[in-house]
Amino acid sequence: MTLTVSPVTSEFCARVSGVDINQPLDDATFAIIRAAFDEHLVLIFSDQPMTDEQQIMFSERFGPLEGTRGVNPGSGTPFARQSNLDINSGAVIPADDRRMFYQKANMFWHADSSFKKVPSLCSVLTARIVPPEGGATEFASTRAAYASLSEAEKAEFEELVIEHDFAHSRGLAGFTFTAAELANINPARHRLVRTNKANGLKSVMIGVHAKCVVGWPEDESRALLDDLLARATRAENTYRHEWRAGDVIVWDNQAAVHRATEFDTTHHQRLMQRTTISSGIPVAT
């Protein structure tokens, strides 16, 4: 089989076939995958059911993994678990359970871990159990948002720093952290404009975790962040993925945002497992 990269939209996203990512990848093969990631931002691999060990092996080719902590059921492991199934019993979690309420914020456009001191490079999400309908994931290109800016705007925004706050974003969904949980949650500051070192293409790191522009009045700050997100999520800049069991998707958290969509959590089961790869780029000063 020959490794093939097939663009899905004119702006971003591609399907990768002809490679078994559950097996160790030689450097030449991974170089093709990494180049496709840098170009297309979102890569889809179909019919690649993974074990936890295989997902870790593949994810670590992109860099060091973040550990999961906090409220997510996968806390203490390399995995963030997105599911309506109890991690211990396998029973369906009631819709009014705090664990399900916590996940509602995933339906906002966001970039994983932008609220951390060291933001993530990318995420790898595997579909373990998929409902018969609903539960799609939508992606949008923030590289396209940057490209839509005027030259004056690009120059002005180059030095802007954004504060990202996990408590703020979860609060927008009505979720409240306990005092103990808040003790481990602190806002982080990162430059708005990100540059891909491999190809020099620029993007903006935005999404629901992006609370404000440091040093700007609140109304102007909110207006800019909302405008950038609106640019990114124009129809021509988005892709909606209807999951099948065994699908694997890798996406760039500094040049794309994504969001979950609803499914019937009472009557259907869904289990997705995410690994997140650190960028190694520290907080802005």
Image: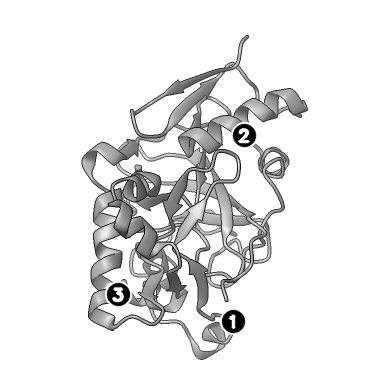
Amino acid residing under circle 2: Arg
Dividing the picture into quarters, in which one does residue 31 lie? Answer: top right
Q: Residue at x 45, y 67 (%)?
A: 159
**Residue underneath mark 1:** 184
Whether residue 235 appears in this view of the structure is: yes
Q: Residues within 10 Å of mark 1 (few under 14, many from 20)?
A: few
> Distance from label 3 to label 1 (Cα)?
26 Å
Do labels 3 and 1 touch, CB within 8 Å?
Answer: no
**Residue underneath mark 3:** 221
Q: Residue at x 29, y 51 (%)?
A: 149
Q: Residues within 10 Å of mark 2 (few under 14, many from 20)?
A: some
**Residue underneath mark 2:** 34
Viewer-side label of 3, 1 = 3
Residue 119: percent from left, percent from top: 57, 62
Give the mark, 2 or 1, whose residue is nearer the N terminus: 2
Q: Is residue 233 above or below residue 229?
A: above
Give the mark, 3 or 2, whose residue is nearer the N terminus: 2
Amino acid residing under circle 1: Asn
Q: Residue at x 36, y 75 (%)?
A: 212
